[in-house]
Image (tube, rainbow, N blue to C red):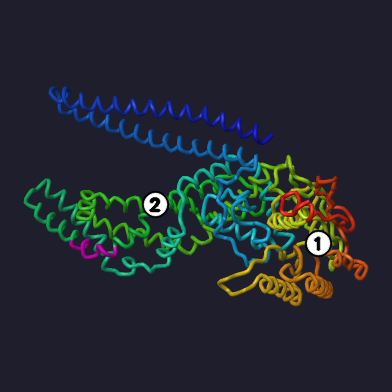
Amino acid sequence: MKEKFYKERVKNLNAGLDSVVKVINLLSFARLVTFTMAIVMLIYVLKFSIILAVTGCVIILFAFAAEVKGFLKKNKRKNHIKSLIDISNNEINALNYKYGQFGSGNEYISTSHPYSFDLDIFGDGSLFQFLNRTSTRAGSDKLALWLNTPGTTRELIISRQESVKELSAMIDCRQDFFAAGKQYDESEADMNKINEWLIEPPCYNSKVIFKILALLLPLFTVSALITGIIFPVFIDFFILLFLLQLLITALRLRYNNAIHSIIGKRLEILRKFDRLFACIENEEFKSRILLGLQNNLRYGHTSAHKSINKLAAVVSAFDNRLNLLAGVLLNGILLWDIQCIIRLEKWKLKYSDKISKWFDVMAEFDALSSLANFHFNFPGHIFPSPATGIVISAKDMGHPLIDSRERITNDFSILNKTEFVIITGANMAGKSTFLRTLGVNLVLAMCGAPVCASKFDFKVFNLFTSMRTSDSLQKHESYFYAELKRLRELIDKLQRKEDIFILLDEILKGTNSADKQKGSKAILKKLINLSGTGVIATHDMELAKYEKKFPANIKNKCFEVEINGSEILFDYKLTDGITKKMNATLLMKQMGILNE
């Protein structure tokens, strides 16, 4: 359904692109005609009338300028439409679970995080990459932050859900924002340079002498130039002032260059931010969070969009110094470098304390757009309900990153705190995938996003997993020691009375069977005594038998397999009880590891 929508959108966009290209070609031809007319005017009309020739050239010049302006505007529109086409084509691929074109979030991977490494939240093929439609670095960071530290209150989660629902329907707004943001990618170094400039104290605005020079010298120089044209005897005075301004500029060249290298090279980034702020400011929102974001961009009679636009205009003017001839003339007549830096410093003094709030608004809107895109693409996923009386209750829960044509869903619930579900099953039966399915959906739920289920009620809590422990040569840690550290961290959290939900994939994988069985039982008993709640996947049948000892705290579930001769059938359906079938030996025989 959504694939058909995007294909139709691409078709309409291509039609719009063709129209824009025709206008661009027409404007290009018009510019050629206008230029030819100017040549004809100068060659032929000049012979008969200077006034007519000059008047005609002026009119033609204005027409040519209008054509150039129109050409640039239409060319910008062409690039924007191309971006929108790419966006829709990428979404078609994403609907077919081909999403490698989006940022993977490798930079956010942390093996020590309470759950993100175990649940594949970041990296290639991760949940982040599946969701990520951010077009700014700040937005990417914000989305990563939400996935790493989801909402901790019921109110925040519900408010974010409302914003995601509203923004989901605003596809033009979301895609215009994404397209504008993708026109130019800012790096971490770029943002560091901008922040460096923002905190740097003003130089010229803090010294009266520069303010006086910037005001009086250009005034006297322009006056001397006009007077010198009328009365040539005064032209020497103009030359003197011209050279004086060049001398002052030369003396301050090192500082001026330093400022230009920081802010001048980021002009395209500023223009990008200007467009992004305009996208947010020009919409009409209803949800509380989106209205709040929009209001945070407004300041008296101005706004973030208007303010950044002014800054970009000053930076663009400052860039004129890059043309050698223009730089000499502008600095010799108007003390241009110092004038521009004074204007930049005035802007900074007025708005620098608001920049961080504006950027945070942009980042949050960017992250919300990603969640809204997820909701739009997969309308069958539902918004979960934060509950208080239960831990979790889910129906038809599946992993959102598994193709819907292959996905197997399960019902699952834990109604009481201090309850553990122990899941047993044969190799490859689906235990680890189920743990990740549960964990990923809980992360989505607490972020305010939809979940892959037909019903999903949950208690708001912190998540902790131990599923993919690894050894470390750099830290001189064995696999077993790394696992013990992870379990120690879990127990410390419980002893501090943190409200956490636990997902464990085998306990004490790194030791021998006798030790593992004894230690696993002791740890399970410890977790129960500390009022822990969660799910443990294991091959250890003895651990599952603990249900008889702690009937109020332990429930057994399993993934069963069907073994028909040499054939193994998996249905990946969660059922009650302890598994009765194992398949390790049969699998090794099928792979030729063991002889028949």
Q: Which residue position is annotated with label 2?
A: 267
Q: Residue at x 66, y 70 (%)?
A: 479
Amino acid type, mark 1: His
Residue farthest along the left direction in this orientation: 233
One can see residue 52 in this view: no
Residue of label 1: 539
**Residue 369: image x %, image y %?**
61, 48
Left or right relative to 112: residue 45? left
Q: Quadrant of the N terminus?
A: top right
Segment tinted magenta in the rendering: 247-255
Q: How many marks?
A: 2
Task: Classify residue 186 as left or right of residue 49.
Answer: right
Name the residue located 84 percent from the left edge and 46 percent from the top edge: 565
Give whichever of 101, 579 is nearer the camera. Answer: 579
Query: Element under label 1?
Result: loop
Q: Earlier in the sequence, mark 2 or mark 1?
A: 2
Local SS, label 2: helix
Q: Is residue 158 magenta?
A: no
Q: Of 187 and 269, which appears nearest the observer?
A: 187
Residue 399 image point, x, y percent: 73, 50
Query: Which dot, 2 or 1, sits closer to the camera?
Result: 1
Q: CA distance from mark 2 to mark 1?
A: 59 Å
Does the magenta stretch mainly form a helix, a strand or a loop?
helix
Give the answer, above or below, for where 95 lies relative to 547.
above
Task: Decide: few, some or many residues near mark 2? Use Cα within 10 Å; few <14, some 14-19, many ≥20.
Answer: some
